[in-house]
Amino acid sequence: MTIRSLGVRRAALLASSVAMVGLLAGCGSGDDTANAPRTESGTTAPSDSTGSAPSGVPTDAVSNSLSPSAPQSPAGGTRCHTSELSASVGRNNPGAGQENFPVVLTNESSRTCTLYGYPGTAFVDASGKQLGPDPERSSAEPETVKLAPGQSAWAGLSFANPEVSGAGTATPAALVVTPPDEEDPLKVAWKSGQVPVSGNESSVRLIPFSPGTGA
């Protein structure tokens, strides 16, 4: 074999080796891609073992957050439930063309509980149908009222005297009262005559609970 032939053969072998290395490298790259972890769009992040919301999720979307009318009760008391309360409407205290009634809730249970905010109220007829628009809440700052057994709290309910305002009227059969953050209502017979139910001066206004009976 001549020196020239030997050189040509070595060059061919070298080219073949380079091609084989390139082929192996390409195969290795394809395998890595196939075995890499895949992140699927929309995958839910694991929840925190402490019960807190995953990062980026609003806390109130995953927990029973307290409404503005239901802060944490102070030590020594928890929220009063409807089954623990009785309701009544106190004597009218009129003034400046306004009728003003205290809506009173009394703790009938054997434990201390709390009220905070406004009652839900509605005038209803004998069939239970609401009369007039929903009440409007005042901008007064609520306070937490602690009720020992037998103690009461009152919230003010007022409206313009229909004889003065000219509003349309009806005579309710009852006032439905729902304690703050409760769903079950209490019903109080309404014995104070006509109330405004239509027209520009038909609004009923509420102020939040304060200690006592409002008498």
Image (cartoon, rainbow, N blue to C red):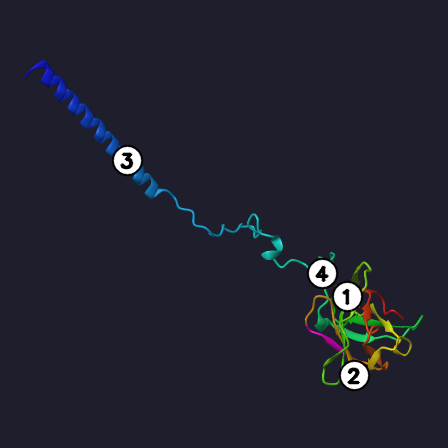
For label 1, the crowd category at 10 Å Cα-Cα, with few meaning under 14, some 14 to 19 and many 20 or more, is: many
Q: Is residue 152 visible?
A: no
Label 2 vs label 4, nearer the camera: 2
| Quadrant (top left, top right, bottom left, bottom right) of the C terminus | bottom right
Instruction: Compute the Cα span from label 2 to label 1.
Output: 22 Å
Q: Are marks 1 and 4 in contact (CB under 8 Å)?
A: no
Callout 1: SS: loop
Q: Give the CA distance from mark 3 to mark 4.
A: 65 Å
Q: Please give the range of residues in magenta.
A: 184-188
Q: Amino acid at mark 1?
A: Tyr
| Amino acid at circle 2 | Ala
* Residue designated by label 4: 70
Residue 175 placement: quadrant = bottom right
Position of residue 132 measured from the top left corner of the image (x, y, whole percent):
77, 76
Q: Nearer the viewer, mark 3 or mark 4?
A: 3
**Left or right: 72 in relation to 35:** right
Q: Residues within 10 Å of mark 2 (few under 14, many from 20)?
A: many
Sequence-first tag of 3 and 2: 3
- Marks 2 and 1, the one that precedes in the sequence: 1
The earlier-in-sequence mark between 1 and 3 is 3
Label 1 vs label 3, nearer the camera: 3
Sooner in the amino-acid sequence: mark 1 or mark 4 = 4
Residue tagged 3: 26
Q: CA distance from mark 1 to mark 4?
A: 10 Å
Question: Which label number is shown at residue 160?
Answer: none
